[in-house]
Amino acid sequence: MTWGFLGLEGGPVVGTAGCTSLLYGTSGRSAPAGQRDGRGLRDHERMESWTIKHFSQANPAGTGQDDVPALLRRVADSIESLGLVEVQDLVMHTEVTADGGWPSLTVYFSDAED
C-alpha cells in the first residue's frame, strides 16, 4: 500500500505504510516557585527534548484528490496498520494546485505504553 506524502517543500513524495520519521520538540515541566537550576533558570523555564513519530498522507493527485472523507478513511487504515500506538495530534493542511485543493493530514503518534 502506498500513498502520497507531503515533502519538506510541500510537494508529493511516495511512501509506504511502514514509513515514519522523527520530529523533535520541547516540553516544559513546572517546579516549585523560586526553584532554580545552576544556570539561573527556574525548572519550568528549562525545556526538555522529546521525540515523536509522524507521517503525512494525502489522496493521490488528480480526480478525487479533494475527497476529505476518503482521506480520513486512508489515514484511519494507516493508523490501524501501525499496531498499538497513541495518536497525539492530527493536523490538516490543504495545498492549492491547478486541479483544486489537495488536503493532507499529518498524524503525530507514539508507541502505546504497556
Image (cartoon, rainbow, N blue to C red):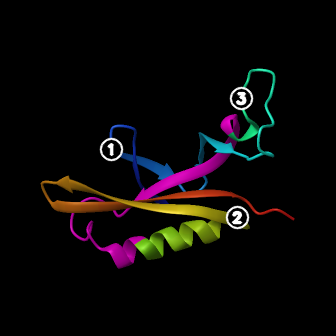
Could you classify mark 1 by the number of other residues whose Cα lies within 10 Å: few (under 14), some (14-19), or many (20 or more)? few
Query: Which circle marks residue 29 in the picture?
Result: none
Q: CA distance from mark 1 to mark 2?
A: 26 Å
**Residue ID for mark 2:** 85
The residue sitting at 61% across, 54% down in the picture is 18
48 part of magenta stretch: yes
Q: Quadrant of residue 109?
A: bottom right
Seen as rendered, the residue at the extreme top is 39
**Residue ID for mark 3:** 41
Pinpoint residue 79: horizontal percent, then vertical percent.
59, 67
Q: State the SS at label 3.
A: loop
**Residue ID for mark 1:** 10
- Tell me, yes or no, if residue 81 can be seen here: yes
The residue lying toward the viewer, choosing from 55 and 33, is: 33
Confirm or deny contact between disc 2 and disc 3 (CB under 8 A).
no
Q: State the SS at label 2.
A: strand
Could you classify mark 3 by the number of other residues whose Cα lies within 10 Å: few (under 14), some (14-19), or many (20 or more)? few
Q: Is residue 66 above or below residue 35?
A: below
Report the quarter where the C terminus lies.
bottom right
Bounds of the magenta segment: 45-71
**Left or right placement of residue 38 versus residue 77 in this view:** right
Q: Quadrant of residue 62?
A: bottom left
